[in-house]
């Protein structure tokens, strides 16, 4: 059976939603509308560069309770889950650190945040019911950035929504954070470190998340977008790329980011987590894998 795919180019990347079904105008339109609607919805919840977003409202009120929707709490909770799973290596309170690292300048956008290399404790984020909605309070002099988890979270959400609504085998690829739901027939996807001379590794996947984290695409002179919360500055790591297969895309992204930040300790940490991963250095060397990760050029099946 043929595949039907739609693409939305935004966030300086490409977002794809694909199903295993014969292409029709109605199906393309439904997929396109779903993808655009969900991306715009997440933008309104979590974009640091959209003044009317809920994350900007929380950041402007740092230290005070701020009214939010429960949808925002869902995205924030996914980030807190990632922080817990990675023992704080993926910290949602790095908004001001990203400004200090030069991210806003690189992106050509202004988050209206002051720069800082101080790292706030994510465990001090508070959530409570209030006025029929939710209320969130972050520590004073801190700012949320939910970008480390949001694309993976969105991939999971889109794959689940699409598969449940249509029954079709589905892949959601949000700029390299993939979620596969393909019980009918395993879907072949690839981890690509985007490094010259390094072949992508392909998998036949029925139900899993796959993510690759690297410093290449979002880097600039003296910096990149992956912040080490222990220093508050761009991570000093010799890994150029880390790919992880996990239960879902949000978890895979968080683990790949943590593995990158942890540097030489990354492979052992991923092994302890029981996850399949691929660590690649600049130019392809050194390279190290964990769990069942195959060598480049060999395709393997991953059970659901």
Image (spheres, rainbow, N blue to C red):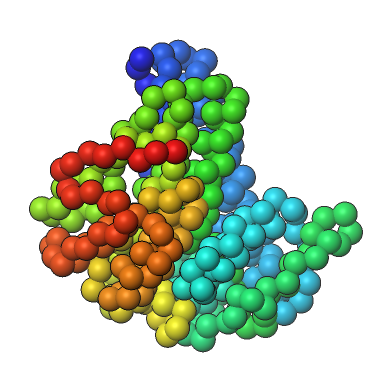
Viewed as shown, does residue 90 lie left or right of 53? left
Name the residue located 42 percent from the left edge and 34 percent from the top edge: 206
Query: Does the image show residue 144?
Result: yes
Report x, y in % for residue 213. Answer: 35, 59
Viewed as shown, does residue 1 lie left or right of 144? left
Seen from the viewer's position, the closer of residues 59 and 245 is: 245
Report x, y in % for residue 227. Answer: 41, 74
- How many marks are shown on the rendered structure? 0
Furthest toward the left, the residue is 197
Query: Does the image show residue 257?
Result: no
**Quarter of image, res 142:** bottom right
Q: Is residue 95 above or below residue 16?
A: below
Q: Considering the image in quadrants, where does the N terminus appear?
A: top left
Q: Is residue 162 above or below residue 78?
A: above
Report x, y in % for residue 242. Answer: 30, 60
Q: Is residue 241 above or below residue 19?
A: below
Q: Considering the image in quadrants, where does the C terminus appear?
A: top left
Name the residue located 37 percent from the left edge and 21 percent from the top edge: 3
Report x, y in % for residue 45. Answer: 63, 54
Name the residue located 27 percent from the left edge and 51 percent from the top edge: 293
**Quarter of image, res 268:** bottom left
Name the residue located 31 percent from the left edge and 68 percent from the top edge: 267
Furthest toward the right, the residue is 131
Seen from the viewer's position, the closer of residues 138 and 89 is: 89
Seen from the viewer's position, the closer of residues 228 and 101 is: 228
């Amino acid at each position: 059976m043929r595949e039907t795919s739609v693409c939305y180019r935004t966030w300086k990347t490409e977002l794809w939603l694909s199903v295993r079904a014969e292409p029709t105008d109605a199906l393309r339109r439904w997929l396109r509308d779903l993808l655009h609607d969900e991306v715009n919805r997440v933008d309104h919840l979590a974009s640091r560069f959209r003044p009317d977003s809920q994350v900007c409202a929380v950041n402007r009120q740092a230290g005070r309770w701020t009214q939010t929707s429960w949808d925002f709490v869902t995205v924030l909770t996914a980030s807190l889950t990632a922080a817990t799973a990675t023992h704080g290596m993926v910290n949602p309170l790095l908004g001001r650190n990203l400004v200090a690292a030069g991210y806003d300048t690189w992106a050509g956008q202004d988050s209206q945040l002051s720069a800082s290399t101080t790292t706030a404790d994510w465990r001090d984020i508070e959530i409570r019911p209030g006025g029929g909605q939710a209320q969130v309070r972050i520590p004073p002099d801190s700012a949320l950035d939910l970008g480390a988890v949001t694309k993976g979270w969105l991939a999971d959400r889109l794959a689940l929504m699409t598969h449940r609504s249509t029954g079709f085998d589905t892949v959601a690829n949000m700029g390299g954070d993939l979620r596969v739901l393909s019980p009918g027939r395993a879907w072949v996807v690839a981890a690509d470190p985007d490094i010259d001379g390094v072949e992508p590794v392909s998998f036949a996947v029925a139900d899993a998340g796959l993510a690759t984290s690297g410093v290449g695409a979002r880097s600039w002179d003296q910096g990149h977008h992956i912040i080490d919360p222990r220093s508050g500055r761009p991570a000093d790591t010799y890994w150029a790329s880390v790919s992880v297969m996990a239960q879902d895309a949000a978890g895979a992204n968080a683990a790949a980011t943590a593995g990158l930040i942890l540097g030489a300790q990354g492979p052992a940490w991923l092994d302890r987590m029981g996850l399949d991963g691929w660590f690649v250095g600049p130019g392809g060397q050194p390279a190290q894998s964990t769990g069942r990760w195959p060598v480049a050029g060999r395709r393997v099946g991953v059970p659901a």
